DNA sequence: TATAAGATTTACT
DNA sequence: GTAAATCTTATAT
């Protein structure tokens, strides 16, 4: 029986956002929305490297009402609306004043799957959390949770002792950031393909 | 005030 | 594979 440990502040406060993005794979994202718990294993992340990253909202130190959350201390949720429809969930990292963040792009549904199905209005488990906009819907995350403390009791991360092996991780460039020029080519995207999960799907 | 673009999803051809 | 949906945010008048 593996021990479940809540991810604590020190994990988020470190200064290498790309390293943190890699380490988030296999961690379990938990939400308690209106008292209902849902959990998902993080299977895809992207790092956004603050002021020097053209793909980041905070590029060049840009500071607006929307990006303000990214300047908070590590362990804060940065949630914003994309394309007017989709709520995207990010984990803020580093110290207060440094706008680093990791976008969570997909999850493997883990607990509260019936709730996810209702929220997503589908029974297709493979698609419940298959993109950054759909996973927030499945988890009940909306922009009203922007700025939520990830060491609190609404949204948090757990370490279930899942340690992806090198063979289970793919690295590539980020998605949907063509406007970022050369920065769009950076290897900041991490994908976790669990071997036993794939076998289970035959 | 007005306009353009977006860290996407879904349905349709 | 292509395109529409859809609306907030940021930037330019």
Image (cartoon, coloured by chain):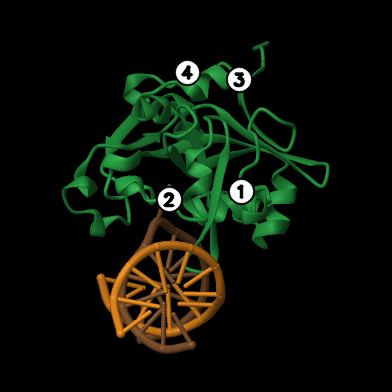
Chain colours: A green, B brown, C orange
Q: Earlier in the sequence, mark 2 or mark 4?
A: 2
Q: Which residue is located at x 35 percent, y 40 percent?
A: A50
Q: Nearer the viewer, residue A175 or A64?
A: A64
Who comes first in sequence, dot 1 or dot 3?
3
Q: Residues within 10 Å of mark 3 (few under 14, many from 20)?
A: some
User: Which residue is under mark 3?
Assistant: A8
Q: Is residue A185 left or right of residue A169?
A: left
Give the percent coordinates (x, y) of residue A36: 80, 43
Picture residue at 56% right of the left edge, 16% below the top: A161
Label 1 Cα neighbours within 10 Å, binned few <14 / some 14-19 / many ≥20: many
Return the residue at label 4. A163
**Residue that numbered label 2 is attached to:** A63
The location of residue A113, given as percent across then percent down, is: 69, 45
> Which residue is more in the foreground, A101 or A71?
A71
Separation (CA) of disc 1 from disc 3: 19 Å
Mark 2 to mark 1: distance in Å? 16 Å
A147 displayed left or right of B7: right
Q: Which mark is residue A146?
A: 1
Dots 3 and 4: beta carbons under 8 Å?
no
Question: How far is disc 1 from disc 4 in space, using C-alphas?
Answer: 29 Å
Which residue appears at 30% of the width and 50% of the height? A55
Q: Nearer the viewer, mark 3 or mark 2?
A: 2
Label 2 residue SS: loop
Measured as percent of width and height from the top left, residue A24 is found at: 47, 28
Tags 2 and 4 on a common chain: yes
């Amino acid at each position: 029986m593996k021990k479940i440990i809540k991810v604590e502040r020190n994990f988020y406060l470190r200064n290498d956002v790309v390293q943190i993005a890699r380490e988030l794979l296999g961690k379990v994202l938990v939400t308690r929305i209106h008292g209902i718990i849902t959990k998902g294993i993080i299977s895809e992340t992207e790092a956004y490297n603050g002021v020097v990253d053209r793909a980041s909202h905070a590029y060049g130190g840009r500071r607006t009402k929307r990006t303000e959350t990214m300047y908070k201390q590590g362990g804060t949720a940065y949630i914003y609306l994309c394309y007017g429809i989709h709520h995207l969930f990010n984990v803020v990292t580093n110290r207060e004043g440094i706008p680093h963040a990791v976008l969570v792009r997909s999850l493997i549904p883990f607990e509260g799957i019936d709730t996810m199905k209702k929220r997503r209005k589908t029974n297709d488990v493979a698609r419940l959390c298959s993109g950054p906009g759909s996973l927030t819907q499945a988890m009940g995350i909306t922009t009203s949770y922007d700025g939520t403390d990830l060491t609190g009791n609404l949204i948090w991360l757990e370490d279930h002792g899942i340690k992806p092996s090198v063979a289970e991780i793919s690295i590539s460039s980020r998605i949907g950031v063509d406007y970022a020029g050369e920065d769009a080519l950076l290897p900041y995207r991490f994908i976790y393909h669990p071997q036993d999960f794939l076998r289970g799907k035959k």
